């Protein structure tokens, strides 16, 4: 049951976006740029990170939706269960293991990241852009997990499948483009901050 009184009892994240389009639109545009834009990481790898981070945070909604999305891009769903148990023994490509270990540490104990953690990512053949994008996906989904959990948003497995297929087919831009323009706002205009 959502914690916001204005949302229906079976609300999903899309309902939150429609209720608060002024903040949802830039957030979804960021999703589109980060998860679908150019990157050394494939779309499947970025969705895998989103699902993995959400699983580490025990956010059932985001883990469910992004496991389904990653699966639509060819990631075996059982891989996520194996990753949550142990990255090193999981059947993920060896090159991805240092990157996934990095985002796991960033999620669980961010202040404990060291240069050695980054060096392991670079030694696996990734560049600055790859580490930036992995860290950004990790940060975004730590935010999204807290948004979902804080607002009491839950979903059912059948919804996750629908959401995953839609995100595979349409990306995040379609969600942003489908939002209403907030009443009394000038879309694209940010009022100045005054003291």
Image: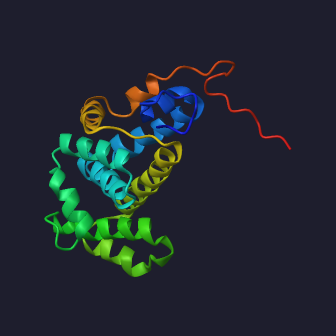
Residue 157 appears left or right of 117 = left
List x then y, in percent, for residue 102.
36, 69
Residue 43 appears left or right of 144 = left
Q: On the image, which quarter does residue 11 sit in?
A: top left
Query: What is the residue that sits farthest to the right in this orientation?
Result: 195
In the image, 3 versus 28, the foreground residue is: 3
Residue 67 appears in the picture as rendered: yes
List x then y, in percent, for residue 98.
28, 71
Residue at image location 47% in from the left, 78% down from the top = 112
List x then y, in percent, for residue 139.
46, 56
Residue at image location 33% in from the left, 64% down from the top = 127
In the image, 21 versus 57, the foreground residue is: 57
Q: On the image, which quarter does residue 113 sit in?
A: bottom left
Q: Quadrant of the C terminus?
A: top right
Residue 129 appears in the picture as rendered: no
Question: Measured along the vertical axis of the image, is residue 76 above or below residue 152?
Answer: below
Q: On the image, which quarter does residue 74 sit in?
A: top left
Residue at image location 39% in from the left, 64% down from the top = 128
């Amino acid at each position: 049951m959502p914690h916001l009184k204005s949302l229906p009892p079976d609300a999903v994240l899309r309902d939150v976006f429609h209720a608060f389009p002024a903040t949802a639109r830039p957030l979804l545009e960021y999703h589109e740029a980060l998860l679908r834009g150019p990157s050394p990481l494939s779309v499947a790898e970025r969705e895998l990170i989103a699902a993995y981070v959400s699983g580490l945070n025990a956010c059932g909604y985001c883990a469910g939706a992004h496991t389904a999305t990653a699966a639509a891009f060819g990631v075996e769903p059982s891989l996520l269960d194996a990753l949550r148990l142990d990255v090193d023994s999981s059947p993920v490509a060896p090159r991805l293991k240092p990157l996934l270990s990095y985002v796991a540490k960033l999620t669980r104990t961010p202040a404990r990241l060291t240069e050695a953690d980054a060096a392991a990512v670079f030694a696996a053949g990734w560049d600055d852009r790859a580490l930036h994008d992995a860290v950004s996906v990790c940060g975004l989904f730590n935010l999204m997990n807290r948004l979902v959990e804080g607002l009491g948003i839950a979903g059912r497995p059948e919804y996750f499948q629908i959401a995953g297929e839609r995100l595979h087919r349409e990306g995040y831009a379609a969600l942003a483009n489908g939002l209403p323009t907030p009443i009394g706002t000038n879309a694209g205009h940010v009022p100045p901050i005054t003291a």
